[in-house]
Image: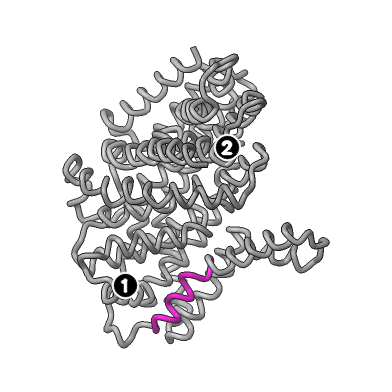
Amino acid sequence: MPLLITAVGVLVLLLLIMKWKVNTFISLAIVTFLLAIALGIPLSDIVGSIERGLGGTLASVGLIFGFGAILGKLIADGGGAQRISTTLIDAFGEKRIQWAVVLTAFILGIALFFEVGLVLLIPIVYQISKQVNLSFLYLGLPMATALSVTHAFLPPHPGPTVIAGEFGANIGMVLLYGFIISIPTVLIAGPLFTKYARKFVPDAFEKANKGGMAALGDSKPMPLEDTPGFAKSALTALFPVLLMGIATVTSLLQEAANLPDHWLFHVVAFIGMPTSTMFLSLLLALYTMGISQKRTMAQLMESAEQSVKAIAMILLIIGISGSLKEVLIVGGVGDYVASLFIDSALSPLVLAWLIAALMRLAQGSATVAALTTAGLVIPLMEGSDVNVALMVLATGAGSIIASHVNDTGFWIVKESFGLTMKETFATWTVLETIISVCGLLFVFILSIFV
């Protein structure tokens, strides 16, 4: 029944948005309340669960998106995005620019959270798409692919790091094997899939996208000599990567060398938190993309206000999608899925992927899916010679399959690229499924040799 109720809820949501054209935020709110009632959550607890889900989601991404949107707009309006995009085009050529975007996103994605990478790169990719007259989505999908793959498979991202801890896997081996499976997965789910997706949903690629977060990169072109230098522009855009990278390396060195606790480590950890990182990067951008470019404070604040307006509805949709996810978790949907696999005799690798995939489909959260899976398959690993690092990657692969309406990431991508529901399913949902299946396939191939 929990799965049937969830399926009906998803169907109602699709009808509200696609058939009856109800606003996405309102549709999500309606379905969230209806599902809470249908799943048997006590009436006195429903509002609290919805508020907790919204608050928890916005607490983790709200400030990141707010600071990141202002940062992106400052870089775009200050000419930094134009300078970066022009330099990349000159270096790689227009024919290979998609590969340049993929490579950039993959490198940045190793250190950046998915949401941070997305809000940081969208203005730059949008500028590139305008300059070379290519579809924004044609460049944006491979970019999002690279960010998603690194987020799913590579430490120090939270998912693989936490799962490795649960399984007792060596982080270094998870990182090594993660790189091996990530590179072909990005190529298949990114540039290769985008080529075919363009044939299935041509409207999504052909429309002049100025909605969503693309608006952050929509600024008037200026003479190249009036834009900031490439070094200054790149430093501003890469500053979050620099701060997070320093924090990550410091943490790993402290753990490897078993160094005693010190106030300096706490300062570095604080600076490396995504919210702190984006705030400090914003302050830097006010100088590098504003004051040093002789822009007035009134002009800078106008850019800030425009960026916040561009993401206001996105933040509401992200928040209420967190409420939907919370209702499904509180309603016991994940517990029901977990009960289906008690005493299963499947291979640990297959079982880890399958449980994580079903948990992801049922309740939306990749993190919850991965952690629940870890608790279920750990007992089954006893007496098995399965490689625990590969178990981490198989679990991570399953936990990101088929992103749909109960996943916050689905709405982030939909609103960021200004897509319809149909276009988001045909691109992002399929793309995430390809990443998941490729991840499992390459894990199996690796298991033959390690």
Q: Quadrant of residue 50?
A: top right
Residue 402, relative to residue 192: is it above or below?
Answer: above
Residue at 73% across, 57% down: 255
Residue at 57% across, 44% down: 160
Q: Amino acid at mark 2?
A: Asn
Which percent across, then down, holds residue 251? 69, 60
Which percent across, then down, holds residue 448? 47, 37
Instruction: Give 197 or 439, whichever is nearer the viewer.
Output: 439
Residue 450, relative to residue 338: is it above or below?
Answer: below
Span colored in magenta: 229-240
Instruction: Give 126 or 385, whichever is nearer the viewer.
Output: 385
Magenta stretch contains residue 56: no
Secondary structure beneath disc 2?
loop
Which percent across, then down, holds residue 237? 46, 70
Residue at 20% across, 41% down: 201
Residue 300, relative to residue 39: is it above or below?
Answer: below
Residue at 47% across, 44% down: 316
Disc 2: which residue: 387
Instruction: Give 47 or 349, whichever is nearer the viewer.
Output: 349
Residue 328, relative to residue 182: is it above or below?
Answer: above
* Label 1: how many Cα within 10 Å (few below 14, some 14–19, many 20+): some
Mark 1 vs mark 2, CA separation in Å: 40 Å
Disc 1: which residue: 88
Q: In this view of the protein, can residue 326 be seen by the observer?
A: yes
Q: Amino acid at mark 1?
A: Leu
Secondary structure beneath disc 1?
helix
Mark identifier at residue 203: none
Question: Quick check: 299 left or right of 376?
Answer: left
Q: Quadrant of residue 218?
A: bottom left
